[in-house]
Amino acid sequence: LIQLFIPLNALGFVYREIRQALVNVERLFGLLADKPAIVDAPGAKPLTVAQGELAFDRVFFAYRPDRAILTDVNFRIPAGHKVAVVGPSGAGKSTLARLVFRFFDVDQGSIRIDNQDIREVTQDSLRAAIGVVPQDTVLFNDTLYQNLAYGRPDATEAEVYEAARMANLEGFIHSLPDGYETRVGERGLKLSGGEKQRVAIARVILKNPPLLILDEATSSLDSLSEHAILGALREVSRQRTTLVIAHRLSTIRDADTILVLSGGRIVESGDHLSLLALNGEYARMWHQQHQSD
Ligand code: ATP
């Protein structure tokens, strides 16, 4: 009994440590955002994605009551289309992505996927339907292969290799002496921002979700790396409903619609050429970024 007790006790300690860490995170959120935790609605059903249309219907949102972040945000991404959101830092772009993922609930209005309010479906089914390529991808202390396969643990080897090829990672992996067996993460090989982002893209290719959120890295990449990423992103967003949070305008010229968010409101929307012709906020941002190139 004693032999059993010691490891269990140690486990109990680990469990308490983890719980404490979670409580701390909750407190942190509590301080930053005065919001109740998200729970499934009673009787919530799984999301069923037929087409994959994403709609924001007159959404208002604030992290804290005294400071509005999103005001009357209205837009629709038809199935398979790509919509990019641009705007100054702090405009609320990443907040849109957090709301789609339901880290927080909207204060007014609704977010709908194929006409189902995301508050009325299970969180598991919602998150399973959305692939995210974040700004900064977390790599585990494991082999590159395992880090890629994390996108879908039951994927076959052939599928993992194909995803790496589509994400433009093949050349990089073949240049490593241990190839796919290279250990990465904090205790292994450190990947560059662009390489990590391509790992995230390969994971999404394996997960194969109908909806995609791309949170473009803010840091500037060298042009070779940017080219590789753009090719990979184009591949992954083909035929998928895609919301791109963009920091560099050159990467989203091909979006079906570009939304300009400023102070939490959509102030302009249209494709690249029509927004340039409008000669407003977008045109100003475009000329500014291209002057400094
Ligand atoms: P950037 O281009 O710099 O990434 P952004 O447009 O994505 O900016 P958001 O991250 O959506 O901006 O943030 C919008 C506003 O909400 C900012 O002023 C930010 O300080 C605030 N904010 C973000 N997260 C929280 C939070 N958890 N609690 C309180 N305020 C927050």
Image: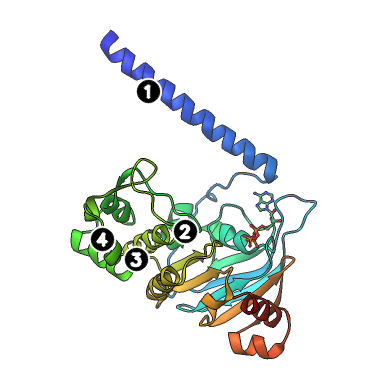
Q: Earlier in the sequence, mark 3 or mark 4?
A: 4
Secondary structure at badge 3 equals helix
Kindly check if marks 2 and 1 are in contact, taking CB atoms under 8 A apart as contact.
no
Q: Which label belongs to residue 175? A: 4
Secondary structure at badge 4 equals loop
Q: Which of marks 2 and 4 is nearer the N terminus?
A: 2
* Three-letter amino acid code at the position of disc 1: Leu
Which label sits in the foreground, 2 or 1?
A: 1
Q: Which residue does the numbered mark 2 point to in the structure image?
A: 126
Q: Earlier in the sequence, mark 1 or mark 4?
A: 1
- Given residues 122 and 153, the one toward you in this image is 153
Q: Which residue does the numbered mark 1 point to in the structure image?
A: 11
* Three-letter amino acid code at the position of disc 3: Ile
Q: Where is residue 262 in the image (x, y as percent from the top left)?
A: 72, 69
- Given residues 229 and 114, the one toward you in this image is 229
Q: Which label belongs to residue 205? A: 3
Per the model, the C-alpha gap separating discs 1 and 4 is 41 Å
Q: Residue at x 25, y 56 (%)?
A: 176
Q: Residue at x 22, y 54 (%)?
A: 177
Viewer can see residue 1? no
Question: Within 10 angstroms of label 1, few (less than 14), some, or many (20 or more) residues?
Answer: few
Kindly check if marks 3 and 4 are in contact, taking CB atoms under 8 A apart as contact.
no
Question: Within 10 angstroms of label 3, few (less than 14), some, or many (20 or more) residues?
Answer: many
Q: Where does the N terminus fall, quadrant-wise?
A: top left
